Image (cartoon, rainbow, N blue to C red):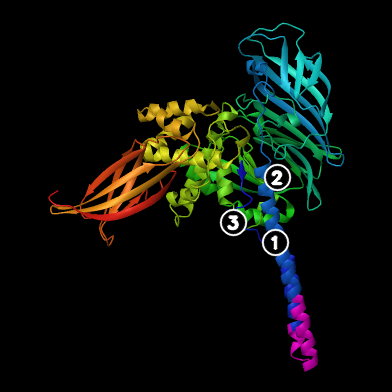
Amino acid sequence: MTNDSFRNNINTFSRQDAKTAKVRFRRCKSNFFTRTNSQKEKIIKRVSFVLFVYSFILSITIINNLYSQQTAYEEFLSNKIKISPEGSYILNEQYNQDVIHYSISVKLNTDKKTLTGDVKISMKFIKQIAPDIVLNLYENMNVDSVFINKKTVKASQNNRHLQLELNEEFSLQDTFYIHVYYHGTPKNIGYSSFKFGEFNNVPLVGTLNEPEYASTWFPCNDRPDDKALLDIFITNDSSFTSISNGILVNVTNTGADKTYHWKTVYPISSYLICLYSSKYESFTDTYIFPNRDTLPLVFYATPKHLEYAKKDFKEHPVMLTYFSKLFGEYPFKKEKYGVAEFLWQGGAMENQTITGIGTNFVRGTGRLTDVLAHELAHHWWGNCVGPKSWKDIWLNEGFATYSEILFAAYYDSSLSIGERMYAYHDLGFAKPVYNPAEDMFSSTVYYKGAWILHMLRYELGDDIFFRILRQYFETYKYSNASTEDFIAVCESISQRELKYFFNQWLYNAGLIKLNYSAEIIRTDKGNFLKVNVKQTQDEYPIYNFPLDVLLSGESWDKTEFKTIRITQREQSFEFEGGNSSVKFDPFNKLLCTIIEENTHYRQEQGK
């Protein structure tokens, strides 16, 4: 997920407005020189008034748009998503259940804003046979009937749960088949879990399930680590295009309705299952794998945004090539990749194989590359390798954010990776990255998570770091990993004990705060530079880290590069030579603030 309302400059003055202004101006110009002076004065006044009105409208439009973007971003930050306490939303019994397949059939009524659902779930028990099955389903969805293996069972709804009594015995080897009929108006909570909305007076329906809102519109075992295969059937008015995960199997017409059948051939977490339905217009592109296999790229835009979308979405083949070389082959090659506009205006959401992006972002400026790269990167980090729990959300968002920044440095070399990282070094980071609770979509998870990867790369070197990422991807693809799993891969590939590194950066708050003083000492036998370094942060007593030092003479015409190791609260270092200037962390490899206290000269004899 990307929360990026503040990133994009949006051109709000429409083409029609510009065309109207040009026509009026041309009419005035063509008749101007045939008029008397008094008539010319009137024309000038009228033109001045028209220009003033258009300037005023343009200014108000831009201000309103910037205000709406800022409001959306502030709303995103203030509307903290709180993961339910353990044992409240996901009950203990649900960890004993393994969903194998979902078949979700929904019929949408955009006029009444209702949904009629018919969901089939195949499932097994994992460790022991239980007397009940527990699914997640919000109470706004009214259950009409439930069957297990075609037999009616007793069902009860309470506190976002649907509890089903088993009326026959099963073994651990048995698969049982649940069939739920239900209807209602889905709740629109979280960041827009299910929205019956409009864009340009056209209905647009969309979902955003993360982290625990899939059950606002279909019954499920809403754990991020319970992946399953999916068939989804979306029925709406025949003028609508309905979109979901995976590949499009077929489209069928029934009277005034049209049903789209989508299917995944790779497992999917419930929070990544989605639907979008509107009067979309689409266009396609193709990504070609190194072995000449092809991946369809399918993009869905609202009609007035079609040309904008063609400009904004055009770099996907470049992104796919870059990430595939860096991390491993795009993991959903038998399906597709796509992007669709939806109505959450806080950013974008990486629904598996079909990213959703807010309509207010698509403006044809070509400035969506960072957002779209972030969502595409999630298809490695989050979608293919999923989190074992929401405590591990940094494995999604920190990884996707660093991937986004890596691509930005590759795509636009005017700023280095270090310069780009430095833009996110002073964001406070007042809480730990791991298990962020209500701060799971905070700058700490996104940007400090990215910094952790950047510093791990510095600690281990490029070769080992990228080998770790590729091995982590290969080991856990199409399944789920925990933070401990990732650390284990890091230690295995690097052959180093790294718990100190993750303890200081991942499980604790804050960043390094470093004060230093330098003393240039001149002696009969030569000069040397003595540097005193002191860690001053309160959140963590002593960070252990490598520190790059750039030394130079007075004119900086000669420089010397060294790396020292900081392992104490206060340390001193001496550098021989004619150096008189020092710069720490010149390439922005560390999450730290560095303050120079003073530098002075001292003369000594006989040293």
Q: Position of residue 554 (x, y in %)?
A: 27, 60
Instruction: Indicate which disc, 1 or 2, sits on the residue closer to the N terminus.
Output: 1
The residue sitting at 43% across, 49% down in the picture is 418
Give the quadrant of the N terminus: top right
Question: Closer to the camera, 346 or 35?
Answer: 346
Mark yes or no: residue 290 visible: no
Q: Position of residue 3 (x, y in %)?
A: 62, 45
- Kindly state the secondary structure of the residue where label 3 is placed: loop
Mark 1 and mark 2 in contact? Answer it, CB < 8 Å: no
Left or right of 148, for residue 90: left
Residue indicated by mark 1 = 63
Q: Which image quadrant for residue 42?
A: bottom right
Q: Position of residue 165 (x, y in %)?
A: 77, 12
Amino acid at circle 3? Gly
Q: CA distance from mark 1 to mark 2?
A: 21 Å
Amino acid at circle 2? Trp
- Kindly state the secondary structure of the residue where label 1 is placed: helix
Left or right of 229, for residue 149: right
Q: CA distance from mark 3 to mark 2?
A: 20 Å
Residue indicated by mark 2 = 344
Crowding near the residue tagged with mark 1, few <14, some 14–19, many ≥20 C-alpha atoms within 10 Å: few
